[in-house]
Amino acid sequence: MSETNAAASITTAAPPRSTSRTSLPFARFTDADAMGDILWQRLSSWFAGQDDRPTCAIEHSRYKTYLKVQSRPRSSLSVCYRFGLTGCGARSREVLVYVKAYLGGRSWSEWEKLAPLHDVDRHGGPPVIHLPELDAIAWRFPHDPALAHLREVIEPGRVRAHVPWRLLPHGVPGPDRTAVSSSVAHYRPETRCTTRYDLRWNEAGAPRELTIYGKTFNGDEGRAIYDRMRHLWEISRQNADHLRVPQPLAYTDAVHTIWQHAVPGAPLLRVVDATNYVHYLDAVAKGLATIHTSGLSGSIAITPDDHLAESCKKSLKLSEAFPGLVRPLQALIRHLETEMPAAHTSRTLIHGDLQMHQLLANGGHVAFLDFDECADGDPAQDLANVVVNLHFDGVPPTLVDAMSSVLLASYRRAIDGEVPAHRLDWYARVQFLNKAYRAYLWHAPGVEAKVGHIVELAARATPFFPGKRS
């Protein structure tokens, strides 16, 4: 499961207004084919024994500025590449390579800080390599500059010591009699990694298997997330018709990892269509209402003031990167300033990053995933996030409107109350701006046209105020 480009489905016939000054230095790093060739030549020891040249895809990309965008020497681009490799006997495997690119030769000073890590891993080569010709540094997964404990939960020989065997279902024999294989479900370098573990054993001569997941963090934030998941799991046991979540097993401090059972099902986005969207969006609304009325709290509180402050920062960076978008971005910020709603009066747990990609469909039910971004906030934010994300999920426009209407109507029934349209509208525009900024962070080809199109969407009528335009 990879983290996809948020703006990948946005298309426009309008040519870019100008070339982004900030994306030029990093443009080649977002060309997966070109970088695949470069890394194949430069990191040959990491692909040793492969018969065929690998295919390369971008797994994750993140652009970071330490100061303002004008301070280009302090900027960096982080990209994770997933290589598909085919070897002898047509066996295939994957290799993840994390590349962090700099400007102005800054990779040399960053490389010196890594001097103690210039060792040899089990593949017989250095796990981290300096690429001075690219002004970049590359790490071979599972080596990570901020997740030093990642190897402990990736390599089967090491992870056995951390799996919560006593909490697994009766019949799983334990580490000595159970085969363990791991595969990366999602990896965000320097931040977190979600890993799938397939456990296999024999019972009375018959093969058995069980799948669990581990989510590993770079710090101890996983403890609070685990506690929240455990409480939501208890709520779902009592009211499975309204909320379903993965069953958490344990949290291991030594490797900052949450362990949980796998949830059967298919991504909701693959299942929902014009024949069943009423049923599934009603289920989403009930689950969301159950989370909002759970009485739980998040680790942080997010207010409209916080959103506005972040929106202003993002608008400034986009304006500096794309001068042709200054006027529409200024108009959007003025609208957010004048229409900002008051802070939500009650303490309410929200998902914080809800979209269709984080929902699974199984037997007519919907399971909610990924509670990393939970916070105390406005329920309108979650509803707006779902609706805005539909515009980027390849859903036909007419179905987006219909799905939005069902979601809102079902949610209002579930809470037996109203959600003011102006609050929904405001959060939708904030989320459109977030999408524009994420498209910029990816530095993909045609980024200015994509960002411009999303900014236009933010200025149009939203599903919450159909007749209103900014």
Image: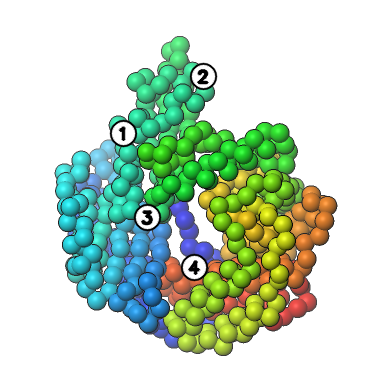
Of the pair 204 and 333, the residue shown nearer to us: 333
**Is residue 286 visible from the viewing direction of this image?**
yes
- Which residue is depicted at the point 56% across and 88% down? 327
Query: Mark 1 sits on what residue?
Result: 158
Q: Is residue 156 above or below residue 303?
A: above
Q: In which quarter of the view is residue 373 placed?
A: bottom right
Query: Is there CB contact under 8 Å for labels 1 and 3?
Result: no
Of the pair 374 and 97, the residue shown nearer to us: 374
Number of the label disc, if any, that sits on residue 186: none
Instruction: Categorize mark 1 by other alpha carbons within 10 Å: few (<14), some (14-19), many (20+).
Output: few
Across and down, in percent, residue 60 comes to 41, 58
Q: Alpha-carbon distance for marks 2 and 3? A: 35 Å
- Which residue is depicted at the point 37% across and 71% down? 66
Query: Mark 3 sits on what residue?
Result: 189
- Which residue is depicted at the point 56% across and 48% down? 371
Amino acid under disc 3: Pro
